[in-house]
Image: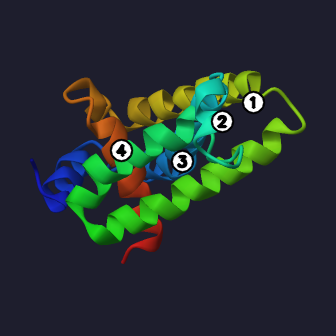
Amino acid sequence: MKTLQQWFDSYAVSHQDPTNIAIHYICVPAIFFSVVGLFMSIPSGVLNSFLPHPIIANWAFVVLAVILVLFYFRLSVKVGLQMLLFSAFCLVLNYYISQYVSILYFSIILFIVAWIGQFYGHKVEGQKPSFIDDLQFLLVGPAWVIFKLFGK
């Protein structure tokens, strides 16, 4: 497995333009947030008997727990903790949004809008998105943004 620095260095190759970076600071967390919402919208009947509260009795919590342990914490404890905090924020905010609107439709719209922004940013950059070469970059991107914003 690559080190954290190797992942960030590879990711940074196609993220040099200030406009693209600014777009990523908005759109990458929005995509992560919307994916959490999409997983939260999956019926979780079986989980309700094991997990006590709706914020954690959903598939988003299960998927995030696995990704945090198998990917982020293996790369770095610091990044793992940062992504744990961001993931918790996403779970809680999605839960509260779901009390007022359909989390499924909200997440789909946010997902589409944020990806349009991402592709525009890469058009400005003149580089293809990193995940085209390796899907793991879909997990590296959120860590890169969170680390850039809060990690130093």
**Pointer 1: what residue?**
103
Amino acid of disc 4: Ile
- Residue 30: x %, y % from top left: 59, 42
Q: State the residue lying farthest toward the bottom.
A: 152
**Pointer 2: what residue?**
48
Give the spatial CA distance, label 3 vs label 1: 17 Å
Amino acid of disc 1: Ile
Give the spatial CA distance, label 4 vs label 1: 22 Å
Q: Which one is nearer the viewer's eye here, 21 or 30?
A: 30
Give the spatial CA distance, label 1 vs label 2: 18 Å
Q: Is residue 138 left or right of residue 96?
A: left
The image's mark for residue 52 is none
The image's mark for residue 67 is 4
Amino acid of disc 3: Pro
> Which of the marked residues, 2 or 4, is nearer the chain's N terminus?
2
The image's mark for residue 29 is 3
> Which of the marked residues, 1 or 2, is nearer the chain's N terminus?
2
Determine the image quadrant of residue 20: top left
Above-or-below relation of 152 to 2: below
Nearer mark to the viewer, of 2 and 3: 2
Give the spatial CA distance, label 4 vs label 3: 16 Å
Residue under the image location 80 percent in, 47 percent down: 96
Determine the image quadrant of residue 47: top right
